[in-house]
Amino acid sequence: MSSPRVAQITWPLFRVVVGLLFACHGLSSLFGVFGGSRGSGEPVPVGLWPGWYAALIQLVCGILVMLGLLTRPAAILASGSMAYAYFVVHQPDGLLPIENGGVNAALYAWIFLTVAAFGAGRWSLDDLIGRRRAAGTTATPEAAVAPTPASVTERV
């Protein structure tokens, strides 16, 4: 298998897995599932800044990236929220992510920035919508212009 073919398969799988994992963080914080917010078993109180809004971004952007729908805007928002989490929540506790517990936030910020740069790839709703739009707007020149009686007689 050639490298481009492998990339066509692995990139969408990578995007789906990252989106799913990110959405699970949101589900955990919003609904208290999967151990709840920070392992407490409880959800973040509704409207609490910044935790509840971060969880909402995680859930919505995770699902959008997983589906490959509005992938670039969702990935930019997710990346920005993780950069905010790193610099505001984690970085004051130490310079490096390994010291301050910000490894996940730093990794997600860079991963989503990469997803925003490369897009959804194949097997995404963005790709499906793009292909349908392209198929609807492309027509052969012969089909686009019907021959008129005058142009038929000129050819003869």
Image (tube, rainbow, N blue to C red):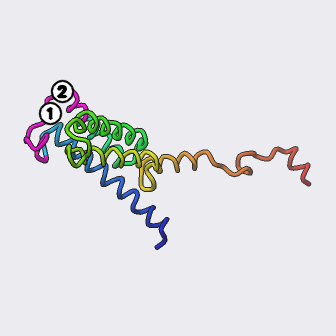
Q: Main secondary structure of the magenta part?
A: loop
Q: Regarding mark 1 in the picture, which secondary structure is present there? A: loop
Q: Quadrant of residue 54?
A: top left
Please state the horizontal and vertical placement of residue 151, each as a whole percent of the image. 86, 46
Please state the horizontal and vertical placement of residue 107, each as a whole percent of the image. 30, 49
> Which residue is found at the position 22% from the left and 41% from the top?
94
Examine the rendered structure and indicate whether residue 135 appears above or below residue 57: below
Inspect the image, locate mark 1, and give the three-letter code of the amino acid beneath it. Answer: Val
**Left or right relative to 45: residue 9:** right
Which numbered circle lies on residue 44?
1
Say if the magenta span includes residue 122.
no
Q: Regarding mark 2 in the picture, which secondary structure is present there? A: loop
Inspect the image, locate mark 2, and give the three-letter code of the amino acid beneath it. Answer: Leu
Please state the horizontal and vertical placement of residue 124, each as a whole percent of the image. 42, 51
Say if the magenta span includes residue 52.
yes
Residue at the extreme front: 95
Q: Nearer the viewer, residue 25 or 132?
A: 25
Label 1, residues with CA under 10 Å away: few <14, some 14-19, many ≥20: many
CA distance for labels 1 and 2: 7 Å
Which numbered circle lies on residue 48?
2
Which numbered circle lies on residue 79?
none
Label 2, residues with CA under 10 Å away: few <14, some 14-19, many ≥20: few
Q: Are marks 1 and 2 in contact (CB under 8 Å)?
A: yes
Boundaries of the magenta span = 34-54
Please state the horizontal and vertical placement of residue 35, each as a whole percent of the image. 10, 46
Examine the rendered structure and indicate whether residue 152 appears above or below residue 48: below
Task: Name the image quarter holding the C terminus.
Answer: bottom right
Q: Nearer the viewer, residue 7 or 69?
A: 7
> Which residue is found at the position 51% from the left and 47% from the top?
130
Q: Nearer the viewer, residue 123 or 44?
A: 44
**Left or right relative to 78: residue 3:** right
**Left or right relative to 29: residue 56:** right
